[in-house]
Amino acid sequence: MTLPDISELTLEEKASLTSGASFWYTKPIERVGIPALMVTDGPHGLRKQREGGDHLGLGDSVPATCFPPAVGLGSSWDVELVRRVGEALGAETSIENVAVLLGPGINIKRSPLCGRNFEYLSEDPIVSGVLGAAIVQGVQSNGVGTSLKHFAANNQEEDRMRSSSDIDPRPLREIYLRGFQRVVEDAQPWTVMCSYNRINGVYASEDPWLLTRVLRDEWGFEGLVVSDWGAVNERVPALAAGMDLEMPSSGGVTDAQIVAAVEDGSLDEAVVDVAAGRVLDLVRKATEGAGAVPGPLDVDAHHALAREAAGRSIVLLRNDAVDGAPLLPLAKDAALAVIGEFAASPRYQGAGSSLINPTRLDSALEGIRELATGEVVYAQGFRTARDVAEAETAALRDEAVAAASAAAVAVVFLGLPARLESEGYDRSDIDLPAAQLALLDAVLAANPRTVVVLSNGGVVALPFADRVPAIVEGWLLGQAGGSATADVLFGDVNPSGKLTETIPVRLEDSPAHLDFPGEFSHVRYGEGLFVGYRWYDARRLDVAFPFGHGLSYTTFAYGEATASVTGEGDIAVTVLVTNTGERAGREVVQVYASLPGGRVQRPVRELKAFASVALEAGEAREVVLTVRRADLAYWDIRLDGWVVEGGEYVVDVAASSRDIRSSTSVAVEGDAVSLPLTRNSSLGETLQHPVVGPVVQAALTRMMGEVEGAAITPEGVDMSVMMASFPIGRLGMMAALGGADDGEGRVDAAMIDDLIAMANAEATPQP
Ligand code: BGC
């Protein structure tokens, strides 16, 4: 299809392209043959509404495969699997003639309370960025687009449409933007969705720094920026900032504002051309890609993939020996008591705009019954409804205890009721409902051979973690989560998921606790860089289960790791990993780096690379992981740029952030940093300057004499240390340096200016 050139459109037509026609459609221009495009949520399935539109998942939508939400899928840490799920999502999008799937969401899980954590991948930007890029590549391989969201620093639901995320430059760059940068640079999503919130006081939707300077000029984004639904505050400044497409429809009101602004000279028409041109580009890509996957949807194949992905999303938190052997996997012929409402009525996705109408739904109870050969008794145990009478709760508990007493093993499904976590609001605590905890205590007393299976989108406190021999974190696993849970419980699938977020002991320990959710529409990110494990490690806090943790039914041994700098300046890390157990399994190998004694504040260690490695029983494999040089960089606030500091980096190869298996180190050459010398540079900095440093040192020696200790006062104070912090522009005032009040040998302004000119004559690298 040939689309018109932008020059063929009238101003009104161009303006009209920059906002939606309805809830899910862009505007067509029939006169010149521009079709409308449909976009839909996202992220873990296709929510194509049959009629009308709403952004909270209220209206009915066509059935689609509900894959595990990000909280689950991310726990696989498996780029290849995540890409395959992306491809399947792209196929369903294509089959339904939708141009753009509104996802993935890769915001950092700053607080466990965020109501939307189930839709996000991790507390770590490398996990979020690497897996986010895999989703985008997978989806877009099928001729449809993605919308990387929510850009940026949208880390809570409370007051989300106004709240300002007040963040210092380093955490903003190193934690909150790093993942977005990775996805944009590696995968070029067709669109990026700007978030509702403000960042340091400026609405994301009208922030030229965010949408143009960072996103396009620095990262090279080539696609279109779309607003989150209703995120536009003032349309004209938003357009000028780089916010191309407003969604949903404004009923033409904002199009008219744009036309008026051009006509009164306050907006350059070229700005409208750029935005409309990007909409045209999107239409071009979508029409070229249309029909890439003919359909019909292979419901069975996608359900099978959803089951595989769910099995890989499950994290085995604990599996202690009871009577001499680990409690899991269960023997298929064991008499089981399956307890808990979630076993029969699964919680498999979160509420809000991502709500999928699944093609099927497997419950764990059915899955267990399918695989078991022994007796399976079900007891509901509790009800998740709001007001349950005490007598009913007690009766359900008694029934569950009786079932547990009679069984070889009790499998108790606990979790968060759907109403507790949703888009649009946050949780106020991380506790499981009291009735569930009481039930678990009663079951444990009746039968210590108890397994807990959890269903939750955000982390929950696990006060029973030391008392229950086996704990399975089932997150929200999508439509096939029930059967996948059975696969893992019986060992048909060997668990291999690992935590992409820390499970704290108490909410009070969590990094953002004192700064969440802020007040009067401002939330200060007071923990700075120390998000997630970076915080717990720096504070040496105990955690319930650390970032990166997850067990298997087999065991893995790590050899001695080696690290070397490659020709591209990256670090290649090599380690031999051996499956030392008796069944095939997968290990998620993690690489953390740190620079002890570095010049800027740094976390104890930070994840830099990972790989999911499949190993047969007894198999050994040399795994090579690449730490990108760019990922070693910190954001230098003096330069407003990335800097790789030179030095000896410690490289930890680990099975979790707190299970380091092998450490090595590697020398990395730093970036040349060139800062001009100014009157505000300190004497200490000046002395380190490669050109003028020796000159100043010689002058000082002349003045103070060669005598050792000349700068030490009778009280033992070393004046040279004190002097080191003096700005050189103010040295003239210091008689002590001149040595005399008569002006003899005094440092004057002209000397300082000469020195500065000499230093800045050519840009010289500094340490
Ligand atoms: C959500 C987005 C979603 C959009 C459209 C918004 O409320 O924040 O994630 O894509 O609605 O439903």
Image (tube, rainbow, N blue to C red):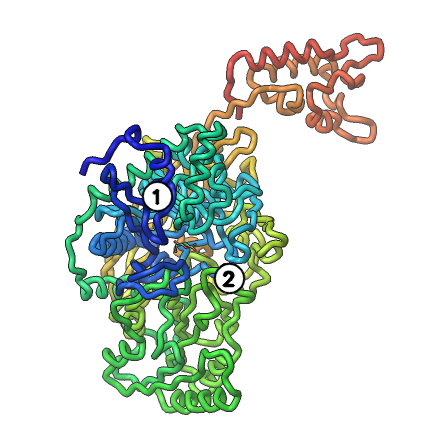
Q: CA distance from mark 1 to mark 2?
A: 26 Å
Q: Along the line of sight, which residue is nearer the eye, 124 or 708?
A: 124
Label 1 with label 2: CB-CB less than 8 Å: no
| Amino acid tagged 2 | Tyr
Q: Measured from the top left, where is residue 392 in percent x and y?
A: 48, 89
Q: Secondary structure at mark 2?
A: loop
Q: Measured from the top left, where is residue 442 in percent x and y?
A: 48, 85
| Amino acid tagged 1 | Thr
Q: Secondary structure at mark 1?
A: strand
The answer to whether any part of residue 241 appears in the image is yes
Q: Along the line of sight, which residue is nearer the eye, 649 or 363?
A: 363
* In the depicted structure, whether residue 700 falls above or below residue 128: above
How packed is label 1: few (under 14 Cα within 10 Å), some, or many (20 or more)? many
* In the depicted structure, whether residue 427 falls above or below residue 190: below
* Residue at position x 51%, y 18% in the image: 764
* In the depicted structure, whether residue 697 falls above or below residue 579: above
Question: For the residue with label 1, is its CB less than 8 Å from the closest atom of ligand 1?
Answer: no
Which of the two labelled residues, at mark 1 and mark 2, occupies the earlier sequence position?
1
Q: Which mark is residue 425?
A: 2
* Residue at position x 41%, y 91% in the image: 402
Q: Along the line of sight, which residue is nearer the eye, 64 or 548?
A: 64
Q: Which residue is mark 1?
A: 191
**Hey, which quadrant is residue 693 in on the image?**
top right
Q: Is residue 267 left or right of residue 293?
A: right
Q: Along the line of sight, which residue is nearer the eye, 321 or 86?
A: 86
The answer to whether any part of residue 554 appears in the image is no
